[in-house]
Image (spheres, rainbow, N blue to C red):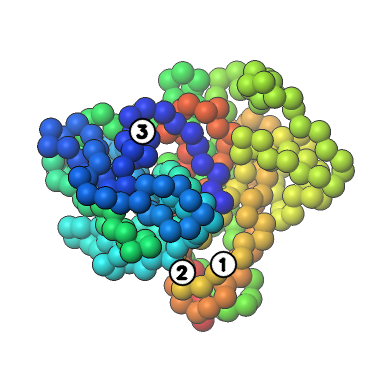
């Protein structure tokens, strides 16, 4: 599962309000379409709807659009190939959207980069699941503009990451493919991620947990716990290989998830703890493996996750996509 962040505001409310979402005529948000669609949360049989999370400016004046989805099924996952049932238009149908849809509300799953002269144009994402079409349009709505690169309230910034030893450090959601690997069916492919993070001002995770009515977790030597997306527990229980001094809570958790592919991907482990001791100059390495059940092209999402305080207004996080060509 994705380690997803929590946020507030009309964005999430409108995304959950209707099965089919279109922009209102006044251009001030998203409103339910006037025809029926299953909005019921159930184990199986409900719809999947795209969700426009927001947008922000890149340094070159272009914009990055963040998009997620809401799968109203609690036990039904979908594999919807790019095409009539999974299309973003105009100019598509492929804008890098997922073809694998996990249950529940999945936020900020992929990014679309649009040029600085995109203006008032719109993109529309059509998804058909369980025979039910859902359509959502998104555009440069000023209400959805994000202050992405720094959270003013606590000084938080996105973690920095790279996917190869000699690659550049990057920060923020990355559109497109950042790294390409090759593999063979049934044979583990090594995944690597290097990350660093500048912690928020006066960041103290134990105090954060306690202030929210919780006690810091305790475990035996072989136990592991995840609290608010943060990995605690014995290194032997965590699996994989993480970097830094492995004591106390992890500063970052490296996470990999399948976005696309013709078969199933087994990632071992899907999360690896990294320890920087709050030093933004410390770059730590995570290693995992991915095993593929069928030949073809896959896309995996890599993300260095820090704890979510709960209300960061979609700031601050980074992710990148890895294409794996499997024979």
> Callout 2 environment at 10 Å: few (<14), some (14 to 19), or many (20+)?
many
**Residue 13 falls in which quadrant of the image?**
top left
Q: Earlier in the sequence, mark 1 or mark 3?
A: 3
Q: Position of residue 238 (x, y in %)?
A: 74, 49
**Residue 229 in which image quadrant:** top right
Residues packed near mark 3 inside 10 Å, few (<14), some (14 to 19) or many (20 plus): few
Q: Is residue 1 visible?
A: yes
Check residue 261 in the rendering and tell me which mark sits there, or answer none. 2
- The residue wearing badge 3 is 13
The residue under label 1 is 265
Provide the secondary structure element on which disc 1 rests.
Answer: strand
- Front-lying residue, 14 or 94: 14
Q: Residues within 10 Å of mark 1 (few under 14, many from 20)?
A: many
Above/below status of 265 relative to 118: below
3 vs 2, front mark: 3
Above or below, 228 relative to 36: above
Q: Is residue 57 left or right of residue 157?
A: left
Task: Report how far apart the C-alphas of labels 3 and 2 lie in the structure.
Answer: 31 Å
- Per the image, label 2 sits on a secondary structure element best described as loop
Mark 2 to mark 1 CA distance (whole Å) = 8 Å
Residue 109 visible, this orientation: no
Check whether the beta carbons of the residues at disc 2 and disc 1 lie within 8 A of each other.
Answer: yes
The quadrant in which residue 212 appears is top right
The residue positioned 61% from the left and 70% from the top of the image is 291
Q: Position of residue 228 (x, y in %)?
A: 61, 35
Q: Which mark is residue 192?
A: none
Q: CA distance from mark 1 to mark 3?
A: 33 Å
Residue positioned 23% across, 62% down in the render: 92
Q: Is residue 13 above or below residue 260?
A: above
Q: Position of residue 70 (x, y in %)?
A: 41, 48
């Amino acid at each position: 599962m994705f380690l997803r962040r929590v946020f507030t505001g009309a964005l999430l409310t409108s995304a959950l309000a209707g099965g089919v979402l279109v922009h209102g005529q006044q251009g001030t948000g998203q409103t339910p379409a006037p025809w029926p669609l299953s909005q019921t949360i159930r184990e199986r049989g409900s719809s999947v709807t795209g969700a426009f999370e927001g947008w922000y400016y890149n340094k070159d004046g272009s914009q990055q659009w963040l998009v997620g989805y809401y799968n109203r099924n609690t036990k039904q996952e979908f594999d919807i190939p790019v095409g009539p049932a999974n299309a973003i238009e105009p100019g598509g149908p492929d804008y890098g959207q997922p073809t694998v849809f996990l249950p529940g509300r999945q936020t900020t799953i992929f990014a679309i980069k649009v040029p600085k002269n995109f203006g008032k144009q719109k993109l529309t994402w059509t998804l058909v699941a369980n025979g039910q079409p859902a359509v959502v349009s998104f555009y440069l709505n000023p209400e959805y503009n994000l202050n992405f690169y720094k959270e003013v309230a606590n000084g938080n910034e996105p973690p920095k990451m790279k996917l190869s030893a000699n690659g550049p450090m990057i920060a923020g959601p990355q559109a497109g493919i950042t790294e390409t690997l090759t593999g063979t069916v049934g044979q583990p492919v090594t995944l690597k991620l290097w990350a660093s993070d500048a912690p928020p001002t006066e960041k103290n995770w134990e105090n954060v947990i306690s202030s929210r009515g919780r006690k810091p977790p305790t475990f035996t030597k072989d136990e592991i716990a995840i609290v608010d997306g943060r990995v605690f527990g014995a290194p032997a229980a965590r699996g994989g290989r993480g970097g830094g001094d492995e004591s106390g809570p992890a500063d970052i958790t490296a996470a990999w998830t399948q976005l696309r592919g013709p078969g199933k991907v087994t990632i071992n482990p899907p999360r690896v703890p990294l320890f920087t001791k709050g030093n933004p100059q410390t770059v730590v390495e995570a290693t995992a493996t991915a095993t593929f059940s069928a030949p073809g092209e896959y896309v995996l999402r890599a993300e260095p996750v820090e704890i979510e305080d709960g209300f960061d207004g979609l700031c601050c996080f980074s992710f990148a996509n890895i294409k794996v060509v499997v024979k």
